[in-house]
Image (cartoon, rainbow, N blue to C red):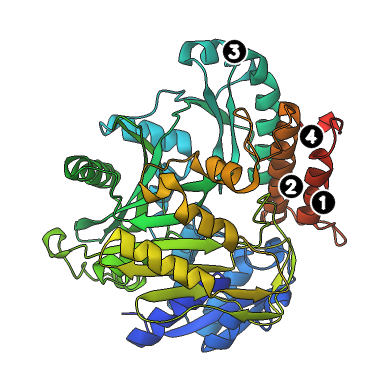
Amino acid sequence: MFRKILIANRGEIACRIIRTCRKIGIRTVAVYSDADRDSLHVRMADEAFLLGEAPPSSSYLNIERVLEAAHRSGAEAVHPGYGFLSESTSFARACRDSGLSFIGPSPSVMEKMGDKLSARKLARNAGLPVIPGTLEPVDDSHAEECARELGFPLMIKAADGGGGIGIDVAHSIEELRPIIQRIRHISEWAFGSPVLYFERYLGGASHIEVQIIGDEHGNLVHLFERDCSVQRRNQKLVEETPAVKLSPELRRHIHNLALELASQAGYTNAGTVEFLVSPDGEVFFLEVNTRLQVEHGVTEMITGLDIVEMQLRVAAGEPLPVQQDDIVAAGHAIEARIYPEDPVTCIPQAGQVDRVSLPSGENVRVDSALCAGYQVGLHYEPLLAKVMVWGENREESVKRLLQALLSVRIEGLTHNVPLLRDVLTSREFVESSHHTGSLANVIEDRNGYAPSPKGNGAMPNNGHDKNDREVAAAIAVAMAMAMKANSSDSAPPAHSPNVWRSYGRRAQLLSRTMGGNRGWR
């Protein structure tokens, strides 16, 4: 086992990794930017090294500086957490080339799975059902022909996208070209690639993912599934396990599909295989995440296993400590993500946390790096906290989570806890009939807003479908700008504006007027 590791990340995930390392006697090295000098992960680690200025390109995405800190500290391995460099094949290779163990899959596996088109081809070759769509990049000259062959509604997706960025739905041929132009622009800005592909839109689907982990001795297991169907802007808000809407037969089928794909790829360390399940029970492969997931904690709560510890042991060359038959799921666990967002509009907020009080108690777990003075700005992932609970059954765990959310106090910053409580008490969620589009129904019931069937935003039901699209575009462009600032290829200007505030003001303006700058489309 390693004696010392460097954590190439920040915030709640860095704190969570440190806790496991403390438990098993591994010393930890934190890295930080100028903006994070006083952050909790810096205080918790045994050592800490300054990487550079606040922009990630100068700090958390600077591979040379991260590796320099690792070697100066005497670390033997690097844990990337999620986000930042966690799915960077070049970073994984650089770690191994410099004599450091990378706590994650091999670079070759990351390369095969990281590109969504490559992963779709691999899944199809492994015999998995793949959503009808293109297996090659779509060029503008053949876009309409491909779209007519696949039929509408149609998803337009960035091949290198992530975090819900670079996705939209076209409902007709007239909508297709404007959406393609917008998604290409967003994808090139955020991910440095304009490559797009098409996928049939699957209405009313549930988002189900399977946690897998393999070692370097040929052992591979699943740790059951998670239902991640409560989403906004294609990003998860509430996750639970088990997925009670699945029959036992369908659950086993999905587990087996995940293991088959992982086996074909020679997968090692932790990851998730993600699926969409249609209302009539059809299963389709979606993608693979080659890293630790934000929502891994709920799986830990039902299995009693520490996934981070398993990652560390596998990366150190040890065999998995359990076989498939040893892994048992007990009870029900559910997680809610607290974001700095307006609970009515879902528009992100920026500012400083003045005071914070988070829930605690038996069968309640909170992963967070929040403290008084915590700043939420442009540069980093805005997730404030993950509140997780366990119960003997789903009803008990939902009640416990509602109670826990009632005790959340975060002063100085608007957050989405009121919306999360509404989700948990909504009819569809209580009946476990919710799907990836259900949040729109919750927002409509809560606020009297009726999201356009063509858009991703929630706006007053005034017939202004174009306004809905404008807001969705404003959000997407702003988020892409933020992700571009987080890209290792470019840094934002020294005096760049706060993008979250800019698009927030624009969205508010658009909600009140028929006009607006159509250049956002």
The three-letter amino acid code for the residue at tag 4 is Trp
**Disc 1 marks which residue?**
502
141 vs 426, nearest the viewer: 426
**Disc 2 marks which residue?**
478
Please, what secondary structure does the residue beneath circle 1 have? helix
The answer to the question of whether label 1 and label 2 lie on touching residues, with beta carbons closer than 8 A, is yes
In whole angstroms, how far apart are the C-alphas of marks 2 and 4?
10 Å
In the image, residue 61 sits, relative to residue 176, either above or below, namely below
Q: Earlier in the sequence, mark 1 or mark 2?
A: 2
The three-letter amino acid code for the residue at tag 1 is Ser
In whole angstroms, how far apart are the C-alphas of marks 2 and 3?
28 Å
Please, what secondary structure does the residue beneath circle 4 have? helix
Q: Looking at the image, which residue is at 69% across and 56% down?
A: 348
Task: Left or right? Give the position of 304 relative to 296.
Answer: left
Depth check, mark 4 against mark 3: the one in front is: 4
Q: Earlier in the sequence, mark 1 or mark 3?
A: 3
**Disc 3 marks which residue?**
144
Q: Earlier in the sequence, mark 2 or mark 3?
A: 3
The three-letter amino acid code for the residue at tag 2 is Ala
x then y, percent, for residue 207: 40, 43
